[in-house]
Amino acid sequence: MAKILVTLPHLSSPGGVSSFWNALLPEFGGRKEFEIIPLEIGGHGKNPFGPLVDQWKLLKSVNKVDLCVLNPSLGARSFFRDGLFAKQLALRKRKFAIFFHGWDEDFEQMVTKRYIPLFKGTFAKAEQIFVLSKDFESKLREWGYTGVVTVATTTIEGSLIQDFSISEKMNNLRSTDKMRLLFMSRLVREKGIYETIDAFRKLKKSVPNLELLIAGDGKEMDRVVNETQNDADIEILGHLTGSRKREVFINSHVYCLPSYTEGLPTSILEAMAFGMPVITTPVGGLKYFFKDKEMGYFVDLKEEEDMAARLKDLILDREKMVHMGNYNHDFALSNLTANKVAERLANSFASMIARS
C-alpha cells in the first residue's frame, strides 16, 4: 500500500484548507491502494521556533512515504514556509504535489517582480500542481512551471447535507414572508462584509421583511458588531460548525460573498448544495466556475448600487430563486461532494506515484 503524506493546518482550526481535508479524509479512509497520513503544521502563534518545528516534522516523515502533498496558499507566510518544504523534498528527490488553495493577487505581483527564481527552485519542482482557477494556471506557466497543472475544486462535507430536502426548502421559500440573506466567512474587509451590510441597508428601505445573518469570526469582528448594533434585522452569529451551521444554511435564502480576491470558497459550494442563489464577484476560480444568471449573480463592487439591485431582482422573484436554488443543489451534488472530489484526487495521486 502506497503512503501519501499531506501537510495541512490543524484539523480543528477554522479555514478553507482544514474544511477541505476534514471532508476528504473520511472518503480516503476506505481505499486499499494507498493510505493518507495527515501532518498538521502551523498554529505556533508567536513562537519563533514554530517554523523550525514544522520543517523537522516534515523531514522526519518524508522517507516513509511515496508522495507528499503540500497545501499552501499563495501568500507571504505560506509561500516561504511551504517553499522551504518543497526545496527540502526536491533535494531528497521525493515526489511531491502542490495544492494552492488561497491566492493573494497582490503577492502574485511580488512573485512576478522578485521571486520567480525562488519559485523555480521550490514549487516548480513538483510533479503536479492543483489550482482553483485557469488564471492561476496561466500564471504558473508564466513563472516557468512545465509540469502537470490541474484546475480543481474545493468540496462539500457529506455529513453537512445528509438528509437535507431540497423540495421542502423550495416549498418553504415560496410561502415564507421573511427573506434571509447570509454572509458566512472570515470577517475581514477583503471578503466584502461592509459592501454586504451596505447593500442590505439600501434594500431594507424597500423590502422591510429582510434579515441579514453574519456568520464567522476575524479581525473585523469588533467593528462589525459596533457598526451594526442599531440594525434590528442584522444578527451576528460568530463562527459556526456542525448542526448549527447546517441549520443556518437550511433557513437562509440568498448567500452573499462579494470578495475582492478568492480561490474557490467552500462556503459558496455549501450554499449551493443547500439550494441558495449566490451573490458574488468574478475573481479567482469563481470567474470560470460560477455561471452568472444561472447560479446567482456576479456583482461589480465599483458600481455602488449594483449589489443591492441584483439582490432586489432576486428576492422579488421567488420562482427565479427556486429555479436557481434547484440548479445549484443539483450541480453541487453531481460535482462537488467529497466523494466526487476525493475520487478525482485519488486518480491524480495514483498517476503521480506510478510515474517513474
Image: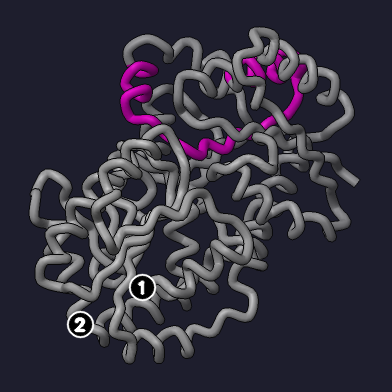
Residue 253 — which label? 1
- Look at label 1 and name its amino acid: His
Residue situated in front as seen by the camera: 195 or 214: 214
Residue situated in front as seen by the camera: 29 or 231: 231
Q: For this view, does 26 lie left or right of residue 212?
A: right
- Look at label 2 and name its amino acid: Asp
Residue 317 — which label? 2
Q: CA distance from mark 1 to mark 2?
A: 12 Å
Q: For this view, does 236 lie left or right of residue 89?
A: left
Give me the residue at 72% from left, 16% from top: 55
Q: Residues within 10 Å of mark 1 (few under 14, many from 20)?
A: many
Q: Which residues are magenta?
A: 83-112
User: Is 18 inside the magenta-drawn segment?
Assistant: no
Q: Are marks 1 and 2 in contact (CB under 8 Å)?
A: no
Assign a secondary structure to mark 2: loop
Assign a secondary structure to mark 1: loop
Residue 90 point in image, percent of width and height: 69, 18
The picture quadrant where one finds residue 107 is top left
Give above or below for 230 relative to 188: below
User: Is 111 inside the magenta-drawn segment?
Assistant: yes
